Structure formats: C-alpha cells, structure tokens
Amino acid sequence: MFTLHVSRRMSLRGKLRRYLAGALWLAIALPGSAGCSPAQNSGPERDKWQRPAEVMAELGVRSGSVVADIGCGRGYFSFELANRVGPQGKVYAEDIKDDVLGDVRRGAKKQGLKQIETVLGAPDDPHLPANTLDVALTMNSFHEWREYDDMLRHVYDALKPGGLFGDIDGAAEPGQPRTTYYDEHRMPEEMERADITRHGFQFLRRERGFTQPDDGKVFYFLIFVKPGPVSHGPAQQQTPEAASGVDASSAATASQAEKQRLSINPVTGQVSASASAFTPLTANERWKLYFTQSYWSVGAYVGPFFAALALDQSRNDPREWGGGFRGYGRRVASRVAGGDIIQNSFQHPVAALLKEDVRYIASSQHGFKRRAGHAVLYSFLTYNNEGHPTLNVSNIGGYYFASAASTLWLPGRRNVAAYTLSDGSEALALSTLVNLLQEFWPEIHHDVFRRPTP
C-alpha cells in the first residue's frame, strides 16, 4: 500500500511539473507571438490567393492615394496599401477593436509607415473624415455590419466624388434570412450589391474572386463608385467653382461607367453584363454598342477571321472560291458581312423592340460546372429590361436571318431553307463556345497576360 501511495504521489508530482512547465511556456510565448505579426494571416501564402497587388490595381490605388481599410483586423491590407500609396499617401486603418489596432500601430511604427493612421470606429460609424478618400476597401467584413445602412452612409460621405468602394466578402447562396449569414460569416453578393447601390453607389464591375486554400471559402470582389455630388448629410452651400468641379468629376465618372458597360472583348466581340448587378441598356447605349460591335472594334473582325479559316478555308467551302489568300479573303468578307453586320443589324433593333439585352449575361455563381452550364444556357436566353431571364429571340433569329441573307452572294445553287437551317444552327452552336470563352475571360485574361481584366 505504501509503495502504491508513493507511486501515485510521484505520478501526481510529474503531472504537476508538466502542467507548470506548459503554463510557463505559454506565458512566455504568447505575448511575443501576439505582437510579432501585425497583419493577421499575412505572408507569401496569403499573398498567393489574395493577390493584393491585383486588388489595388483594380481599385486604382497609386502613390499619393488616400485610402481606408474598413474592418482592417490586424492590418493585412493596411500594410499592403501603405506600401502602395507611399509617404505622400494616407491609409486609414479602421476597426471597432482597439486591441487589433494596437497591433497595427506597433507594426506601422516598426516598419516606419507614418502614412498609416488607425481609427477606432463604431458599429454604425467608421469615423472617417468626410470627402477625403480616393478608395475605401472592406475585406471579409461587410457581412458583420449589423448597422449596415448607417455604415454605408458614412462610407459614401467619406469618399470623394468618383471615389471607388471595393467590397470583398464570402460567397453564399441567396434565400436565407440575414441573421443566418451573420452566423455563417458570409453573404450573397446580390444582397450586398443591393444594400450598397441603395445608398447612392453605382455598381461598376465584378472582378475575379478568391478561394481560401485551407477551407475552400470563396470570396467575390465587387467595385462601386460614388458617382456625384449626392450627400447624406445636411445640404451645404457651394460656390460655382466648387459646383463646377463636382459636375466635371461626376461627368468623368459617368463616362468611365459607360465605357466599362460597353467594353467589347477583343477576342469574342461580346460585351458582358453581370447577372447579379444587372442594369438595362439605355437607348443611347444600344446605338453605341451596335456601331462599335459591328464596325469599330477589334472583336468585330477577330471572330470572322478565325471562323473563315477554321470552318470555311479548311473545308474549301464554297469550292467556287478556291484556296489561297484570294479565297480566304472572300470567306472573311462573307463572315464579316453575314456573321457580324447583318446579324447585328437584325439583332439590335429587334432586341430593342422586344426589350431584350444584347449583352452576354455573365454568371454570378461559383464553380466551373455551374458557370459552364450557365454559359451554354445563355446561348438561348438573355435578360429583359426588368432583369428577368427570357428567350433570346433577337439573337437566335439574327443567326438564321444572316444565314438566309448570305445566300444572296454565295456561289452555286443552294436550297435557301435547308442552308439557312444548317448554317444558322452551326452559328448557334458556335455561340455556345464563344459564351464559354466570354464567361471565363477574366481568368483567361489574367493567366495569359498576367494583368487584371480591363
């Protein structure tokens, strides 16, 4: 019994020693680890999937910019932004937790980044100076905003006219109560876009998103602009000079937004509209898009050149035109006239009459299979002016009309009905491949050219 008692006492002492040793190690190690890395989860691994340089390029952050990192945490983006804007710029690192701001302050002091100023915000107010920011960015934070209406009003007021607001947040399927998304720490982009645009922001574009490698969490990246002199605060008297400056900025912003909405892919010849951020084309935009898409863009000719080579020249069709450059030139001219000019001349006015959109409706979903399926489906569908899916009558009809019209100059005797059905169906099938290319163009453009999509 004595031996057993002593053995138990020795065992208890050993456990006590191990416990005390572990506690001592934690007491020494934890304070040091808490202050050694101001930017939470920073380093090459995060840089690889988060692509901070690309984010800042898309938002136009440059030397001398004044920016805010809203909900900065331990400052991953704050430090990236500070290095980008340089000593002549300014970074407001905002958070509602003073302990994490302390880490940012220590990191900024250690790195000599005097351009970083920490701001202790509130749940309903980031406490940012009015009419000051060129860019505001929030990363993985918007879904936490319970007082999102108040927050958005203050962010809007903090931006200069023409200033950009970047929203990066975790993707979620729509249809759940807002409280569910709070608990899941993610939110559908449709919900956030609706919140943001309701407060005066204009949606510009949706950029390539991100996937966190450790848990597979997917993030979307939305960019908005403060378009003009709207203010959520009390009306203030402006001098004519100040008013003129605001109007000029507003006009420049509107021009930039229209240019983005009508940007034609130089390979596919198409223009994309986001399914999650859809706004219908104006009558003026429809006319501009028709002329640009039919005559004054690189994309109007790239497709016909490749189609004439791959589909016509390779099959020597029609035979009467022969081979060589002369035959190829005739086939290209036929493709440009039929596949572009006539097809667009049918599609655009018919689409206007039927209130159909002539752009490709890019998917708001995530994952290759879903997006690929969407691209195929939207060879036959489009959106109407209310943003609802509808049969793409103008586009489908345009292919068959152009095929019928091409029989007027193609040599040889042809059964017009049979040729129209065959050639129009071939063009429609080819459009599914073009839509796939258009859907994944942001990723293709980035990987091939190593720069953000324009």
Image (spheres, rainbow, N blue to C red):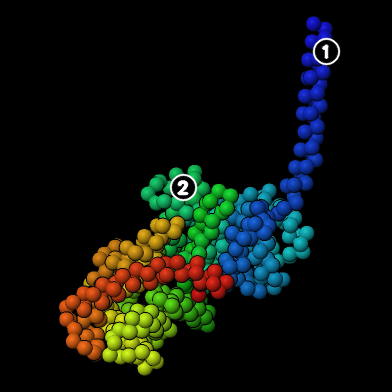
Vertical placement of residue 424 versus 327, above or below: above
Q: Which quadrant, please, contains the N terminus?
A: top right
On the rendered structure, is 410 left or right of 244?
left
Q: Secondary structure at mark 1?
A: helix
Crowdedness near tag 1: few (<14), some (14–19) or many (≥20) residues, C-alpha within 10 Å: few
Q: Quadrant of residue 433?
A: bottom left
Which residue appears at 66% of the width and 52% of the height?
A: 40
Which residue appears at 54% of the width and 69% of the height?
A: 447
On the rendered structure, is 331 left or right of 264?
left
Q: Secondary structure at mark 2?
A: helix
On the rendered structure, is 407 left or right of 136?
left
- Total tally of numbered discs in the picture: 2
* Residue 381, percent from left and from top: 29, 65
Which residue appears at 45% of the width and 51% of the height?
A: 172
Residue 6: give its label: 1
Which residue appears at 63% of the width and 57% of the height?
A: 46
Residue 122 seen in the figure: no
Give the amino acid at mark 2. Answer: Tyr
* Residue 241, percent from left and from top: 52, 82
Q: Nearer the viewer, mark 1 or mark 2?
A: 1
Q: Are marks 1 and 2 in contact (CB under 8 Å)?
A: no
Residue 181: give its label: 2
Residue 343 seen in the figure: yes
* Residue 139, percent from left and from top: 56, 57
Which label's residue is closer to the chain start, 1 or 2?
A: 1
| Residue 371 or residue 403, whichever sits in front | 403
